[in-house]
Image (tube, rainbow, N blue to C red):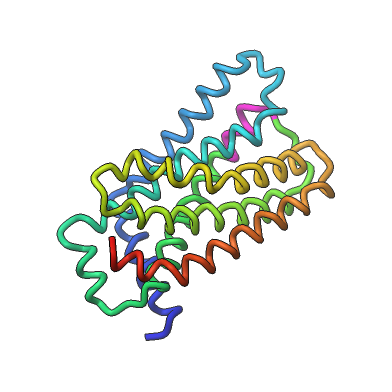
Amino acid sequence: MSLAGEVMLVAGKDLRIEARARVTVSQVLPFGAIVLLLFAFALDPDRGRLAAVAPGLFWVAVLLAALLAIGRSFGIEQQNGARDGLRLSGIDGAAVFLGKTVAIGVQLLALEVVLGLGVAALYGVDVTSVPVLILAGLAATAGLAATGTLFGVLAAGLRTRETLLPLLLLPVITPVMLGATRAFESGLGGDASQAWPWIALLGLFAVLYLSVGVLAFGPLWEDT
């Protein structure tokens, strides 16, 4: 089987498991929505400043929900010897990495669409450039999913993975959070031309961690 076929096999497996368990719909999505609501009430019940801080609040909500999705992606491999079965299947480590990255990315994109609609309804933002929002969202999601998959495998074999994963991941994805927030600020009521350097940063980060993951995930997957 080709690398692309193995990637789709792993991604399809994870997405089918999530579709049947409905964890994203029943837990991750409500969690992200609650975060947005709490921020709205805590920061400004009168909605006077919410539009200005909406990009940052949106990506914080996405990040917190992403931690749940990443932990879930590796948690399912610990059940019923699924991890050992995947190792013995002969699927290349790079394909496992890319497949899990694709599955996490698809879940995050669906989450971002719903949360984005929630931000538009709750925070009263003005959209000035849809292409900027789409490109920034795709690049940031790719970087977040790739980094989360890479660091998720490091924490997967430990009993404290639920608390260790945020400690490993949060410092590394600071460029993603910064770039995505700045790009969204330009796409939501700002100057769209100022978003492109940040989108370039997000793309560079995504390519970097996708490359590192393809090279390093296999040995990490076997050792943890």
Q: Position of residue 173 (x, y in %)?
A: 55, 47
Residue 210 vs residue 111, the one in the foreground: 210
Name the residue: 84% across, 42% down.
191
Q: Residue furthest top?
A: 46
- Please state the extent of the stretch shown in magenta in the rendering: 116-124
Question: In the image, is residue 89 part of the stretch drawn in magenta?
Answer: no
Q: How many marks?
A: 0
Question: In the image, is residue 119 part of the stretch drawn in magenta?
Answer: yes
Q: Is residue 190 above or below residue 154?
A: above
State the image quarter where residue 149 is shown. bottom left
Dominant secondary structure, magenta: helix
Name the residue: 55% across, 58% down.
142
Instruction: Indicate left or right for 194 with 148 as reference.
Output: right
Instruction: Indicate left or right for 91 with 179 as reference.
Output: left
Residue 117 vs residue 190, the one in the foreground: 190
Q: Is residue 212 above or below residue 125?
A: below
Residue 219 vs residue 6, the one in the foreground: 219
Instruction: Indicate left or right for 169 with 53 as reference.
Output: left
Examine the rendering and report whether any part of residue 144 can be seen.
yes
**Screen quadrant of the N terminus:** bottom left
Q: Position of residue 64 (x, y in %)?
A: 46, 38
Q: Position of residue 167 (x, y in %)?
A: 43, 41
Name the residue: 65% across, 31% down.
54
Q: Is residue 142 above or below residue 91?
A: above
Q: Is residue 91 above or below residue 212?
A: below
Residue 112 vs residue 100, the one in the foreground: 100
